[in-house]
Amino acid sequence: MSNPGPDFLMLLRELAERRVDFIIVGGVGAVLQGAPIATFDLDLVHARDPENLERLVDGLLALDAYYREHADKKVRPTAIPLAGSGHHLLMTRAGPLDLLGAVTPGWAYEDLLGQTIEIEIAPGLAVKVLDLAMLVRLKEELGREKDLAVLPVLRRTLEERGRK
Amino acid sequence: MEAPDNSGEAPAGRLSSDSRPTHSEDGVDLTLIRWMLSLTPGERLETLQSTVRSILRLRDVQSGS
């Protein structure tokens, strides 16, 4: 059966409509800021206060989310594990969604909030996105091969944006 | 991404001819970056989704599904 592919707009809309507080990090955030890269999942850092977790779980239920590593059992995400700083690799009806309690220790929602920009991706749908310069810094810190591989494109995108 | 997919809804044909370099010293295609920067964020998201779907379709064809 063919795979229809991710629907990032649907994912973001479902969460935004429930007023879930999150920051787009990773590849989709880079694309929104002009980087010509491809990514197959949406990476979000979510706020971990109880009210937001309640809204988030509600949104995940609407998206039919389950953990990718337990795909056969369809283990559903719940508020308690989402309150931690770990990474939750989910599949949804709109494609893969990675929820990060923190990117790395010290880089949780509140720590990153001052490094975000708000971008309107559709009429009435504005989302917080990690600023490209900060994304470059984080990827430099992480230093994994997959992060290093994309850094030249992100750096040149920053430069070209500066020239505009 | 080697080349964005223009087969979807995102507008194409906005590449302009100018004297700026086409590639950076480290080999990054600057024309793709300039093209992406010419789009709105919503168009960039559509381009990404079209690209990913094209890749998945190609993979499906290869696997015979």
Image (cartoon, helix red, strand yellow):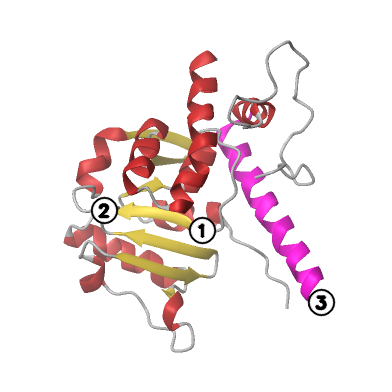
> Could you tell me residue A53's position as x and y percent?
25, 63
3 and 1 marks on the same chain: no
The residue that appears at 80% across and 70% down in the rendered structure is: B62
Q: CA distance from mark 3 to mark 1?
A: 24 Å
> Could you tell me residue B3's position as x and y percent?
72, 42
Judging depth in this view, the residue of A159 and A4 nearest the camera is A159
- Residue B45 vs A15, above or below: the answer is above
Q: Chain of mark 1?
A: A
- Residue pointed to by mark 1: A41
Q: Tell whether B5 sits left or right of A78.
A: right
Magenta segment main secondary structure = helix
Q: Which residues are magenta?
A: B39-65
The residue that appears at 78% across and 77% down in the rendered structure is: B65
- Residue A75 vs A97, above or below: the answer is below
**Residue B55 visible, this orientation:** yes
The answer to whether marks 3 and 1 mark residues whose Cβ atoms lie closer than 8 Å is no
Kindly give the residue lying farthest to the front in the view shown. Answer: B25
- Residue pointed to by mark 3: B64
Q: Amino acid at mark 1?
A: Asp
* Mark number displayed over residue A104: 2
The residue that appears at 23% across and 47% down in the rendered structure is: A107
Q: Amino acid at mark 2?
A: Thr
Looking at the rendered structure, the secondary structure element under dot 3 is loop
* Mark number displayed over residue A124: none
1 and 2 marks on the same chain: yes
**Residue A20 visible, this orientation:** no
Mark 1 crowd level (few <14, some 14–19, many ≥20, 10 Å Cα): many
